[in-house]
Structures are given as C-alpha cells and as structure tokens.
Image (spheres, rainbow, N blue to C red):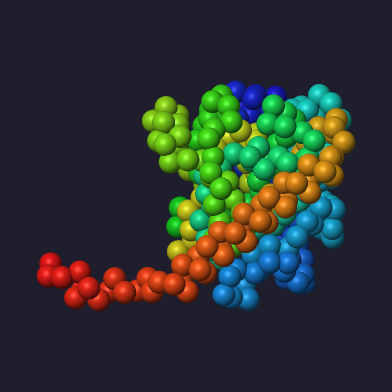
C-alpha cells in the first residue's frame, strides 16, 4: 500500500505522478487567469483563489493515483475541500513559517477540531522544480506523533494572519525529530497529515517555484458558519490591530534615528 509510509511517518513522497503534458497544461492555464493575490509592492501573482475543479485542474482531482491514495487513507467518504496554487516567485518569493495545518481548522473546516486531524490530508504537488535555492518545502518527520504544538499569532510577509510554532517548541522538536528537505520535480506529490510540521525558506534564486496545495478530508461533519465567522473575524482583527500598533509607533517615533551615532555617545 502506498500510504504505509504516510501512516508511519506522517508523509509520503511519490515521484512522477502528474505527466509532463498535464503539468504544462496546468501552467499554461494559470497564465490565462487574473491573480486573486499579488506579492506586496509588485504585480507578480502569488495566488489564484480556489481552483477546485476549474479547467484542467479537474484532471488533478480525477487522477487515479490521487483518488486511490485518498481511498486507502480514508475509510469514510472523502471530498476535496480546496485547491490552491501558490507562486513563490524568483528573487522575492517569501518564506513560509513553521506550522501545522490543523492550527487553522476553524477557517477551512469549521465544526471540526484539532482532535479530527486524521480526517484531513494535504496533497502538495510540484509544478516547477523545487530546490534548496528556490525555497523547497521542509518537514519535520514524525512530528505528528507529538500532537498539537504551541503556536503564536503573527502577520506574514503578505500581510495576512498566520500561526507559527513557537521558537521554544521548535527547538525541542528539531532536537528530537530532525528535519528533512523535500526536493521535488514537476509532477511529484507529497502527501502529509495535518499535524506534520512544515515550512519553507524564501526564494533568492532566478527560478520561480509554483505548487498546488490540495486538501482532502473526510466528509463527516457539517461546516459551522458561526465558528467560521468568529475565526475569520479574529484573524482579520488581529491583522488590523497589529498594523495599527505599527503605524502609531511610526507616527510617534523615528526608527531610523539609531543610525545617528551621536545620540548614543561615544562607542
């Protein structure tokens, strides 16, 4: 069974799943779309919204290998919740914080809880070559055995609310589990569960790094609109409040004054 490593280690990497022709078709289709999000201070696409079952992306969710992997993993009825494409652009693509997907369950599956992590699977598909230089994914193997780890609210590089694992927790997890770098070719797929810790570095290379993020889940709980509204309001307000604090600080204090040596006396 292909999902034996997934069950044992929390992830499974399968090579050459999508054909080169399908990868090419998917990337050409993206060129026809108006991006939903661009990288801050640029017009470079970052995200395209939920592309589930749109155009050639229907071939991804209909792919026999992907469907069979989901059937082997989920004994109950499953669905695909969303399909996103992320573009980590050459030279300026941002890092992604170390996190567990389950942190944001109230956003993508309100009504489920962290105890339901086995009912979710992330299906991460490379559309470009993923290398150390362009910020490939990194995972901490067997970290799913440690449960839900402490996290903290932050604002990501794209000015959205994020939850990242605390520094102290990461130190302990790394010393216990180590870290693996996931090098991928176009068409490769990484399956991982929602407790597996993962993140990625920024892209300082000349090559962009696009990827599909497809989520599968057991269809056993009806989504709760009240939880969704509460969660998304919290995340939106956190971002607004933290940015307001930064704006007020900048209005009342010049942070660049530190460059004036005389303010601090002789060194």
Viewer-closest of 79 and 56: 79
Picture quarter containing residue 7? top right
Q: Quadrant of the C terminus?
A: bottom left
The residue depicted at 51 percent of the width and 68 percent of the height is: 248
Is residue 206 in sight in this rendering?
no
**On screen, residue 102 above or below 87:** above
The residue depicted at 59 percent of the width and 50 percent of the height is: 162
Q: How many marks?
A: 0
**On screen, residue 254 above or below 112:** below
The residue depicted at 58 percent of the width and 34 percent of the height is: 196
Residue at the left extreme? Answer: 266
Is residue 246 in sight in this rendering?
yes
x then y, percent, for residue 142: 53, 28
Picture quarter containing residue 88? bottom right
Side of 44 relative to 59 (left or right) = left
x then y, percent, for residue 101: 64, 40
The residue depicted at 85 percent of the width and 53 percent of the height is: 53
Viewer-closest of 104 and 119: 104
Side of 241 relative to 179 (left or right) = right
x then y, percent, for residue 188: 63, 46
x then y, percent, for residue 219: 85, 34
């Amino acid at each position: 069974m292909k999902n034996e490593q997934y069950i044992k280690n929390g992830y499974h990497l399968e090579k050459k799943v999508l054909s080169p022709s399908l990868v090419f078709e998917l990337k050409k289709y993206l060129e026809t779309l108006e991006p939903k999000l661009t990288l801050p201070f640029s017009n470079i696409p970052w995200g395209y919204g939920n592309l589930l079952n749109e155009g050639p992306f229907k071939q991804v969710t209909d792919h026999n290998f992907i469907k069979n992997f989901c059937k082997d993993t989920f004994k109950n009825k499953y669905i695909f919740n969303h399909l996103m494409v992320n573009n980590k652009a050459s030279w300026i693509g941002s890092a992604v914080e170390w996190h567990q997907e389950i942190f944001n369950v109230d956003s993508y599956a309100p009504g489920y809880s962290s105890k339901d992590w086995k009912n979710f699977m992330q299906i991460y598909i490379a559309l470009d070559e993923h290398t150390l230089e362009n910020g490939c994914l990194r995972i901490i193997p067997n970290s799913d055995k440690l449960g839900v780890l402490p996290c903290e609210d932050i604002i990501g590089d794209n000015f959205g609310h994020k939850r990242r694992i605390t520094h102290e927790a990461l130190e302990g997890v790394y010393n216990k589990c180590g870290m693996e770098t996931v090098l991928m070719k176009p068409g490769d797929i990484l399956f991982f569960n929602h407790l597996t810790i993962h993140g990625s570095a920024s892209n300082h290379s000349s090559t962009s790094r696009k990827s599909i993020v497809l989520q599968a889940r057991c269809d056993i709980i009806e989504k709760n609109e009240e939880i969704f509204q509460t969660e998304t309001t919290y995340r939106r307000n956190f971002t607004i409040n933290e940015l307001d604090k930064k704006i007020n600080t900048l209005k009342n204090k010049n942070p660049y004054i530190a460059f004036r040596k005389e303010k601090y006396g002789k060194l």
